[in-house]
Image (cartoon, grey):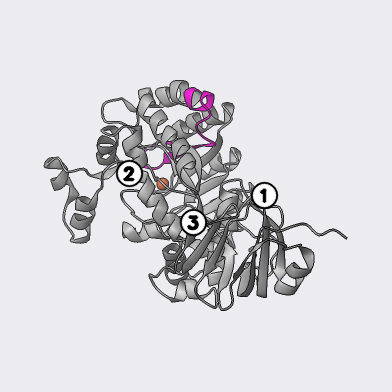
Amino acid sequence: MERPRADLVIEHASELLTCRTGAGDLVGRVRDGAVAVAAGRILAVGTADEVAAAVDRTGARTIYAAGRVVMPGFVDCHTHLVFGGSRVDEYATRVAGGDPAELAGRGIPVGIVGTVGQTRELGVDALVGAALPRLAEMLAAGTTTVESKSGYGLTTESELSLLDVNRRLVEVQPVDVVSTFLGAHAFPPDVPPDRYVDLVVAEMIPRVAEAGLASFCDVYCDEGFFTVEQSRRVLEAGIAHGLRPKIHLDQYSRTGAAELTAELRCVSADHLNFTDPEEIRSLAEAGVVGVAMPGLDFAVAHPRPIDVRAVIAGGMTIALATDLCPGCWLTSMQFVITLACRLHRLSVAEAVRAATLGAAQALGLADEIGSLEPGKLADVLILDVERYEDLAYRLGRNAVATVVKRGRVVVERA
Ligand code: FE
């Protein structure tokens, strides 16, 4: 029988994690594991013996992963990657117990609106330049797919530019970037709220869809931000234009928008700090993925961090993300896993699953990425540790030695 030809084989991993859908241990651990790759996709996965028997490796590159863990690339399913400037002054003031309003009085950027000002000053090239080092850091830490939201422009032209940055980023570096339109991130100070919603619905969404610049439409539904009714208008307009719905839900208050989220079958509901158990159950029934961002709750010292155990108990599939933004400058999914385990009582297996397949589900991409299974993209990490639990155990270090993106070795640490 003719065996399919591999161009890359990674073998003899102390542990290989498939993170496949039906894995009883959530991570699909295989000892003495191997994965074979051809033309950017996974050809075979299993024990080294099984893979050796399944593929023709003539001419293939071989990587010995003895003493190392092999696993799927991390999927970071919620970020605000594209922005100008920095809010380090605000952060330093807050951690010292100071009042950021005093900074704003001196013209120092504070909050989303502060970042909007810094972002609008930059053109597309400068914004690409600002995002690239952050993406490179994410890749070096093992993230192979990143979702990236607009939302720091808040005018039609600047929101389109931010999404254009996402498109440009895909062309110049290896990480896949999934683009989300978040014009409804905040209200620009100079436009009345309902007028701004009109603009998002009647002008921005049609133009974003027409230009093919986003896969998702998101809204920031919370007290002081978009109301449930305004969120409905935004998400329904997005759906009408082929943009799948996502929602920032109940980060600082219980909005009641869980009902809308379930009704519209949003792909994901993100934050969930104040969502009550009954609402969680209805979201689970609607197939909505819950996105937890322990780094954000940590960075803002959130008074009520998400109760991830309750979200899991309610039946939702859980995903992890960094929420990288100027208020939470975090690029490492490994750090997110550490926080999820220690502060939110996830098992390491649960956290790894949520950072890979769970996050792929939050992007509607579970058929393509998030696990090591034949036919999926060959997005593979090799860790310089023997056991995957070391990801949570060894604090604040980068365990990623090698990153394979679409079958190509793109990071190789000595
Ligand atoms: Fe966010």
Single out the mark in the foreground, 1 or 3: 3
Distance of label 1 from label 3 (alpha carbons): 18 Å
Q: Which residues are magenta?
A: 207-228
Extreme-left residue of the structure: 106
Disc 3: which residue: 143
Q: Ligand 1 closer than 8 Å to the CB at disc 3?
A: no
Residue 334 percent coordinates (x, y): 45, 65
Reading the chain from its start, which is encountered first: label 2 or label 1? 2
Q: Residue at x 63, y 59 (%)?
A: 371
Q: Residue at x 44, y 21 (%)?
A: 203
Reading the chain from its start, which is encountered first: label 3 or label 2? 2
Q: Residue at x 57, y 42 (%)?
A: 266
Q: Viewed as shown, does residue 324 lie left or right of 309?
A: left
Single out the mark in the foreground, 2 or 1: 2
User: Is 213 colored magenta in this rendering?
Assistant: yes
**Quadrant housing residue 29:** bottom right
Q: Residues within 10 Å of mark 2 (few under 14, many from 20)?
A: some
Q: Residue at x 58, y 43 (%)?
A: 262
Q: Is residue 398 above or below residue 246?
A: below
Q: Give 333 or 316, whichever is nearer the viewer.
A: 333
Which numbered disc covers residue 367?
1
